[in-house]
Image: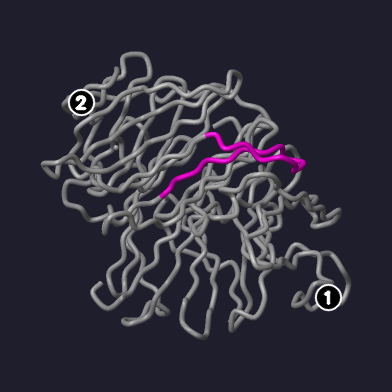
Amino acid sequence: MNRHTRNYSLFFVIVLLIVSCLSGCGKQDVISSADETTEHPRETTTETDCNRAFSNSTGYYSACETEEALYFFGVGRQNQYSYIMCYDKLSDQCFPLCGKADCRHNDSTCNAYINGKCFGLSAYNRKLYWLNRFSDGKSIYKICSCNFDGTDRREYELLGSVSLETVTSEHRVFFHRDSVYFYGSNNIVEEGKAYKDHYLFRCSVSGGETETVFAERLNGTVYIEPYTNHVYIAESGSDADGSGILTLKAYNIETGTIHDVGSYTAENAFLIYAMWADEKAVYLSVSGKEKIYRIDLATAVLDVPFILDEENKYCKNVNFGDDRIFTAKNDPSVFMIGALDFSGKTIMEQDYHFAFLQPGKMYSIFFVGSDLENAYIFFMDISKENISRFIAFPFDGSEARILWSNE
C-alpha cells in the first residue's frame, strides 16, 4: 500500500443489541466466477483525493488515518461532550487533539472540543476536515478544518440549496478534489407508501454555494463512492416480483454529467452496506453480506468474484480497506474479525473474548484504521455510562490491546 501519496480513513460502525445476538437499461443476470482470482489495481492518487474509509450501515465517516496517526470522534462519559481523539502510531499513545497545558478537554476552550453533530472526519490536503450540523430552526451545515495538532480551527458555511435545508438524515460525507460531497435523505410518505428523497450535494471545501448533483425519490437505498474523476452512485431496491435490483451510475467530476453504467438483478440486493471503487471495477456489499458483487466498468458486467464466508461466521458487517476486505460479527461475549485480500485469500480470522461485552448492552464499533500489523477498532458502550475503548487487533492473531478508554 502506497502510504506516501495518499491517506486513508478506515472505519465502520456496528450497532448491536447483545441479547441475541449490489450496459445499459436492461437487467442482467449475475455471472458466477467464484473460482477466479481478482486483481485489485489502484491508481496512485493525491492529497486532494478522498481518503478511504470504513462506513457503518448509514455511511458516516467517523475516523481517518494518516501515515503517522489515527483520528476519530470521541465522547466523554455520560455523553456530556465530544472531542477529536488522536492515536500517535510512533509513540503508541492516544489522547485528545489538544496541546494546551492543564486543559481538561471538556469545554469549548479545548482545541479538541467539537460542538453540534459531526460527520466525515477526513485527513485531506494536510489538514483535518469534517462537516458540522447546527440547528437554529433549520439545519445549518458548516465545513470545519484544523491542523493535525488541533490548532487553526476554521469554519465555512454551506449555502444556497433549499433541498439542503430539508435533509433529515446524513449518510455520507467525503472530501475529494477540492470539493466536499454530502449525501443525505428525507423521509416521504406518498399515497400511503414510504419513500426517501435522496440528495447528493457538492460544495467547495472553502464553503459557499451548494450544488445538487443528484436527486431521486426511491424506496430503496443509495450509496456513493468517489474514485479519481468520478463519484459512483449505487442504488438498491426491488422489482414487482420482489427480486433485488442494483443500479450503478457514474458522475463525472470534470463534465458535471451523470451516465448509467447498468441495472442488474442481484440476490438480496435490497440494502447496500459498503462500496469500493478502483479504475477497473466497483465492489459492493449488500444485504446478504456473504457475497461481494463486482461491476466491471469496461464491460458493465456484474459478477461474484468469490464467496466471503460460506459459513456466515464473520459476515455481520463487511467493509473495504485499501487492499483488504474486512468482516466482523458479534456473539454475546465474542467479537469475531476476518480480513481477506481482493483475490479472496484469508489474511486473518480471529475470535476475541472481552470481559466488557455483556448481554443486553448496545455497542457501537468503529473500524478506525489499519496498518501492516494491526487493525484499530473503537468500541463505545451506548448505555448511559457511554464507556469508550480504543483497541488494536494484531493481524498475527496475538492478544488485542486496549490503547485508550474513558473509564
Quarter occupied by the N terminus: top right
19 on left or right of 4:
left
Look at mark 1 in the image and give the residue it sits on. 103
Badge 1 element: loop
Question: Residue 303 in the image: x percent, y percent?
Answer: 23, 27
In the image, residue 381 above or below residue 118? below
Which image quarter: residue 102?
A: bottom right
Residue drawn at (36%, 48%), measured in percent from left and top?
A: 273
Quarter occupied by the C terminus: bottom right
In the image, residue 201 above or below residue 282? below
Question: Residue 201 in the image: x percent, y percent?
Answer: 58, 41
Other residues around mark 2 within 10 Å, as few (<14) / some (14–19) / many (≥20): some
Look at mark 2 in the image and give the residue it sits on. 27
Q: Amino acid at mark 1?
A: Cys
Residue 211 falls within the magenta-colored stretch: yes
Q: Amino acid at mark 2?
A: Lys
Name the residue furthest front: 191
The answer to whether mark 1 and mark 2 are in CB contact below 8 A is no
217 on left or right of 159:
left
Q: Which portion, as a residue range, is magenta? A: 197-213
Badge 2 element: strand
